[in-house]
Amino acid sequence: MKKNWTMLHKVTSKERSFWRSFSTAAITLLAVVFLQPLLISGCASDANSVASVEPSQTQFSSEWKNVSIGGGGYVTGMELHPQEPNLVYTRTDVGGFYRWHPEDKRWIAVTDNFPLSEEEYYGGEDLALDPANPDVVYIAAGKYTWGEPGTIFKSTDRGETWVKSDLEVAMGGNQEMRWTGDRLAVSPVDSNLLFFGSRQDGLWRSRDGGMSWTAVSNFPANPDPEIGIVAIAFDPNVPGQLYATAYDDRIYRSTDSGETWSAMEGSPGKAMKLAIDPDSTLYVTHATGVSKYTEGTWQDITPPQTNNDDSTLFNGLSLHPTDPNRIIVSLGDISSTKTYYSRDGGSTWTEKNHTANHTVPWWPERYFKNHVSDIAFDPNFPDRVWFADWYGVWRTDDFNANPVVWTNYERGHEQLVTFDLVSPPEGALLLSAVADVEGFYHPRLDNYPQRKFQYENNESFQDTYSIDYSSQNPQHLVRVGGDRWNSTFNGATSKDGGMTWQQFPNFPDNLMPTRVAVSATDPERFVVSASEENLLQTSDGGASWQTVEGLPKGIYGPWNWSQPLVADSVNGNRFYYFDDGTVYRSDDGGLSFSATNSDLPDEDWYAIKTNPNVEGEVWVGLDWEGLYRSTDGGETFSKIPDVKLAYLFAFGKPPAGSDIPALYLYGNVDGFGNGIFRSLDLGETWSDIGDPDNPIGNDPTVMEASKQQFGLVFLGTKGRGVYYKSIPSN
């Protein structure tokens, strides 16, 4: 029986239990998604041939910016302002919230000001606009119901700044059913009146524009305890009338601004989205179709299904802004969503034909219409329709065309989870190892990559968990990864700096590789750690494997970003490993290890790295236990005195005239506080290179620095892709 490695981040026992059960339920769905043909629009190529590479970038931003990947990620909802053209916002499951910039046709992240201590707020539970004031926007922010409490923020300047409300309840922006509903709503006739439907804590009301909240104690619903209240809608035609859907119960209605509520008999039990036309007809998408309620009667208006439809769950719903008889609905939680269109209030339907205009070169066809979360007529452009899905945002400016041409708009929406980064001294400026879309070769940071890594015959992994290069042969790289959806794992090697890859000739079944370290002098020799199993060593490029002696079993994977394994940068026979306060060293090419130091603190979040230029110089970052340095191969360590928090660190190219590598730190330095720092004297003094307005707070996972360009540093995150910045020498 193969193991199931599931979507865990920095795990707790409760999270691990939840995601294991969730993954089991989702495994069939993921198989459907990832077994579809990988047809890259406009960029099919032979993975064994040398790919054409753009000239390397030489100018870099002095502000923190995203590496341009086109990195997708689940856009779980969107809102279009009814009065102001082109004012569009989106929410995502792990990447925060965005506002559309129509002139540049890009998305602007409006929640990047949240620091690491507030990383929960990058989970988008919901988003709401004030219909009467286009400057006002609200977000319900919180990733996990088991994490820190979520809350609601208000902005009066379109997301430039935020004010936190007094609400603190469990939210799950990255949990089940995150792709449906509108839990947060603003009254169209009273901007001070808002309602929020929570997952576990019932219905809440604000009477002061979202700043203070009180529980609605007399709301009589009994929803699913993990899903709660999924949608709230005000009737814009009848003051005081609004609706709330309690999942796995029914729809409730109030006619007195939420003072009292009554169940709507015959209403769908698993309603997804609500829409109300000028005649106060209520439209509902739900788990078994589409319904409408008018004059006290429910009517089933579900579009007729064809034999190849694989779902009756409808989610997306929108009414035309000037003709409410024109309705769009879309199928829900499936990998190839169908869209239906009615011109007569749902009496008859037409399935819309469509084609995709991909603007990201490496996107496969399967990214189109995948798990559509929201679809909407644009209230200010009658023929324009938007939809959001598992990978991004799409728009057509002529919904009446046949077929409808949808264009994806991804600029600025960099929502990837990063596992690892490397920046070799030659070749690509950066190579990224990421979740779900494998990884990328980046000759430039300001253009989309042409394709994913891939290996022979255009095959690819779902994830790459770790990547390393031979420090004396930097064109030779090794990466490990595989497919979570069917628990099949392997690795690949490259001899051309990461442009092309060849899969390992052999790798043991039922093992998930989590980290790799490559010999400094022999690219065929590398050590691989495996999730909760013995480490492995190969001396022939992965054709055969030996069990490593003398080490504890590897860290649990994949959602663990600690870095316990590293090769010496000069001595090709030497490798290092850290676990439970102990540093281990191998002097026989990674076949066996022995403890060299057991005096370091034990810490769950850690990294071990080596000076790129000096044999035997080993550094260990131990989160709140600080940063440590050894100059004798890991036998003795000294603590860097001013570093209070070593969350992440990296070595980069020295400044001109020096052979001391630049040292970068994401952490806390005495006299500065929390931030991002650089030292040019191995930690004796530090300078602050961070930005308080953009603290890179969405749980950064890995730090790397360029070995080619002095001052160029990278931070990978758990949901906002990869950031970079170039810091001048002064």
Image (tube, helix red, strand yellow):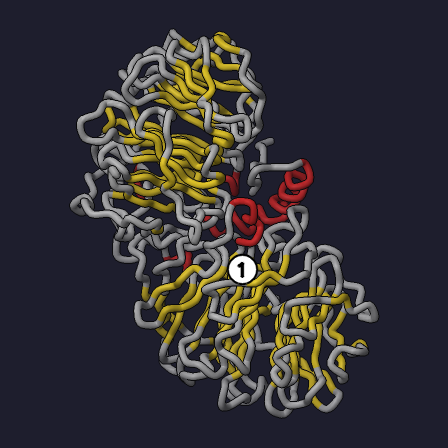
Amino acid bearing label 1 = Ile
**Relative side of 123 to 651, left or right:** right
Q: Which residue is pictured at 67% across the width and 47% down the height?
A: 146
671 relative to 72, above or below:
above
Residue 306 visible within the image = no
The residue most toward the left is 55
Q: Camera-side residue: 27 or 474? A: 474
Q: Camera-side residue: 535 or 606? A: 606
The residue most toward the front is 671
189 relative to 633, above or below:
below
Secondary element under disc 1, as helix, strand or loop, is loop
Q: Which residue is pictured at 54% across the width and 19% down the height?
A: 579
Which image quadrant for residue 636?
top left
**Relative side of 596 to 242, left or right:** left
475 relative to 598, above or below:
below
Residue 59 visible within the image = yes
Residue count near mark 1 (Cα–Cα under 10 Å), binned few <14, some 14–19, many ≥20: some
Residue 196 in percent (x, y) is at 67, 68
Q: Camera-side residue: 286 or 220? A: 220
Residue 496 in percent (x, y) is at 22, 32
Report the residue marked by disc 1.
334
Q: Camera-side residue: 548 or 660? A: 660
675 relative to 670, above or below:
below
Q: Which residue is pictured at 38% across the width and 46% down the height?
A: 722
Q: How many marks?
A: 1
| Quadrant occupied by the C terminus | top left
Q: Which residue is pictured at 66% across the width and 52% down the height?
A: 149
Which image quadrant for residue 203?
bottom right
**Relative side of 447 to 34, left or right:** left
| Quadrant occupied by the N terminus | top right
Residue 72 in percent (x, y) is at 42, 55
